[in-house]
Amino acid sequence: MAPTRPPARVVLDEQSLLTLYESTAARLHRYVARRVGADTAQDVVSEAFLALWEQRAGQVFEADTLRAWLYGVATNLLRRHVRSEERKLRAWSREHASRTDVADVGDRATGAADADALAGPLTRWLTDLRGEERDVLLLTAWAQLSPGEIAVALDVPVATVRTRLHRARARLRTRLADHLTDTGDDHA
């Protein structure tokens, strides 16, 4: 068995921050924009990198955790915008619910129709999740972070991440099953 190497460490200087920004900012922006919109996303991404820059003095970072740390800072910043996020999700939900026409759905491809028909309820269901469960679910689905990276991002144990993810998915599955039973639809 080969000896394990200690994690690579990074002292954050201007060049390494620029490299990190170039490799991470676009993905981080996409994740944040999906949660709060593009206008706010740019501010949140900037604030996250600024926080990293301000906290760099005298700190040595593990290279593998820097990206996850940034997602954690961004997620914490998003919590400031939680009321706005919930209002947007509810409005989007109402908009999609009013646009769903049964005759129109019948004319679409099955997959597209199911996705469109579920857009309104799904956003409502996401809004109804506990904040920490929604954060873990969206970091998994939208940012494509692993449970280990999410644990670093949110500063919680990996087991907590997995529990929250399991609960969020279970709640969404239950809501979907109830919805399909109520609508008489037996596929999705």
Image: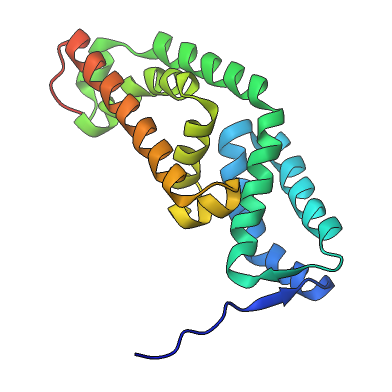
Q: In the picture shown, does residue 67 fall above or below 45? A: below
Q: In the picture shown, does residue 25 fall above or below 141? A: below
96 or 29, nearer to the observer: 29
Quarter of the image with the C terminus in it: top left
Could you tell whether 113 is left or right of 69 in the image? left
7 or 85, nearer to the observer: 7
Q: Residue at x 44, y 89 (%)?
A: 3
Quarter location, residue 52:
bottom right
* Residue 169 appearing in the image: yes
Q: In the picture shown, does residue 59 fall above or below 162? A: below
Colouring: rainbow
Q: In the picture shown, does residue 139 fall above or below 50? A: above
Quarter of the image with the N terminus in it: bottom left
Task: Indicate the position of residue 35 as horizontal and vertical percent values.
Answer: 58, 34
Task: Indicate the position of residue 149 as horizontal and vertical percent values.
Answer: 52, 56
Could you tell whether 121 is left or right of 7 in the image? left
Task: Indicate the position of residue 81 as horizontal and vertical percent values.
Answer: 69, 27
* Residue 144 appearing in the image: no
Quarter location, residue 173:
top left
Could you tell whether 29 is left or right of 117 in the image? right
Task: Indicate the position of residue 29 as horizontal and vertical percent values.
Answer: 64, 48
Q: Residue at x 55, y 14 (%)?
A: 91
Q: Residue at x 69, y 47 (%)?
A: 73
Q: How many marks?
A: 0
Q: Residue at x 49, y 32 (%)?
A: 134
